[in-house]
Amino acid sequence: MSRIAPYNPTEQHYGAAAKWLHWLIALMVFGLIGVGLYMVEQRISPQTIRLYMTHKSIGLTVLLLMLLRVGYRIKNRPPALPVATPRWQKVAAHISHIGLYTLLFAMPISGWLMNSASGFPMKYFGLFRVPNLIARDQAQLDFFKAAHGYMAWTLIALIAVHVMAAMQHHFINRDTILRRMLPMRKKTL
């Protein structure tokens, strides 16, 4: 007999909320990276401006979802890594997760600061105006633009390591690391 993984985590499985937040944020971040790499190569046009506004709105959505994710994680400890996992891998996993979480907060905040320093008004999906965090300033715009770019490449590298580690656990180690994060995964009682 089996059932869908519970909303709340167990010692061996992530809860449904953690899974859905993980995959929703992952999809958004993949989209943001793809669109971000594309749009910076385009000349400014009404279509490009709409693309930038959508990118910024989705980035702010990631920031809000990350707040929910951290709140959930504070109340619900993630399942422990398998006992057979070498200590260095446990340390590497911990450090890489800290890096991912940090960048998933820093990227949208740096984008928001970059937009604020540009003086260009930002509307969240066209619904309401997002307040500027700082005054218009070219030097700060240049700084946050560079920081956003460097962080994007660092995030891409960390995501690649994260995915490769998950694949290594799934296909080489054949353990439960990846399966316990899959949404709608059935588990045996």
Image (cartoon, rainbow, N blue to C red):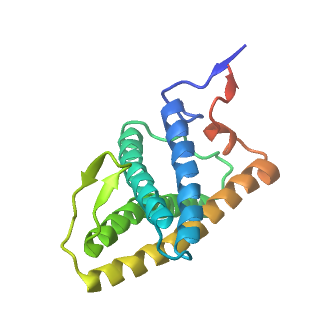
Q: Is residue 144 left or right of residue 133?
A: right
Quarter occupied by residue 121? bottom left
Image coordinates for residue 26, horizontal then vertical, percent:
56, 51
Q: Residue furthest left?
A: 135
Determine the residue positioned at 37% across, 42% down. 68
Q: Residue furthest front?
A: 46
Question: Which of these two is toward me, 126 or 65?
Answer: 126
- The mark total stands at 0
Depicted 185 relative to depicted 119: above or below: above
Depicted 136 relative to depicted 128: above or below: below
Q: Residue furthest bottom?
A: 139
Depicted 67 relative to depicted 151: above or below: above
Determine the residue positioned at 64% across, 45% down. 82
* Quadrant holding the C terminus: top right
* Quadrant holding the N terminus: top right
Determine the residue positioned at 68% across, 53% down. 166
Image coordinates for residue 51, horizontal then vertical, percent:
49, 60
Image coordinates for residue 66, horizontal then vertical, percent:
40, 49
Determine the residue positioned at 45% across, 40% down. 77
Q: Residue furthest top?
A: 1
Question: Which of these two is toward me, 132 or 27?
Answer: 132
Question: Which of these two is toward me, 184 or 64?
Answer: 64
Question: Which of these two is toward me, 108 or 17?
Answer: 108
Image coordinates for residue 94, horizontal then vertical, percent:
51, 58
